[in-house]
Amino acid sequence: MVTDQTTWRILGRAFCLFAAFVVGFAVYMVEAIRTSYDGFPSIFILPFMATIVSGAVVLIAFLVGLVLLLRPLKCFWTSSRVWAGLVSLIGLLLLLFGYTVGLRDTGYNPELGTEFEMLHPAAALGGYFLLLFGIANMPVFLRPQVGAETNQPKSEAIAQ
C-alpha cells in the first residue's frame, strides 16, 4: 500500500525532474539561438533538439543521482538543500563566466573556413550537467536533525 508520504515524495521528485527539464530546455534554446541560429528553418528544429538534449541530460542526472540513495551520501545530501543549490550554482557560474575566466577552446567553422574562440566543451557540458543535476536531485524532504524537536525519539531519527 502506498502511503501519503510516498506519494508526496514521488510527486516532489517528478516536480524536480520537470523543473530541471524546463531549465535545461531554456538554457539550450538561449545558447543555440545565441550561437547557431541561422534563420527561419532553425526555429523549427531547435525546440526538438532542446527537448531531446534536455530530456537525455535530465535522465542521466536522475540515474547518476541514484547514487545519492546510498546511506552515507543520503545523510549528507538530504541534510540541507544548500548542497543541491551549490552544485547548480557552480554549473550556472561555469556557463555564465567560464569563457570570461579563460575556459576557452578554438572552434572551426567549415562553412566560412574560419576559426573562432568558444567556451571549452568540457566546461559547457559540465556546467549544463551540474546545473540540471542539482535541480533534478534537489532533496524533496529534508532529513530530520538529530536532537531537533520532532515527534519521534532520537533512535528513530538516527535509524532513518
Image (tube, helix red, strand yellow):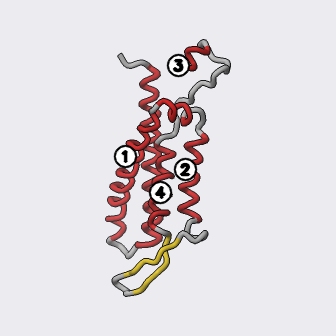
Question: Which quadrant of the rendered structure holds the N terminus?
Answer: top left
Say whether disc 3 or disc 4 marks the residue closer to the N-terminus.
Answer: 4
Mark 1–mark 2 distance (CA, rounded to whole Å)? 16 Å
Q: Secondary structure at mark 3?
A: helix
Say the numbered circle drawn on residue 88. 2
Look at label 4 and name its amino acid: Tyr
Q: Residue furthest front?
A: 72
Look at label 2 and name its amino acid: Ser
CB of mark 4 within 8 Å of CB of mark 1?
Answer: no
- Residue to which mark 4 is pinned: 128
Assess disc 4: are there few (<14), some (14-19) or many (≥20) residues with their C-alpha within 10 Å of its C-alpha.
many
- Residue to which mark 1 is pinned: 59
Q: Looking at the image, is mark 3 or mark 4 nearer the viewer?
A: 3
- Residue to which mark 3 is pinned: 159
Mark 3–mark 4 distance (CA, rounded to whole Å)? 35 Å
Please, is residue 102 above or below residue 75 in the view? Answer: below
In this image, 147 relative to 44: left or right? right
Say whether disc 3 or disc 1 marks the residue closer to the N-terminus.
Answer: 1
Q: Position of residue 142 (x, y in %)?
A: 56, 30
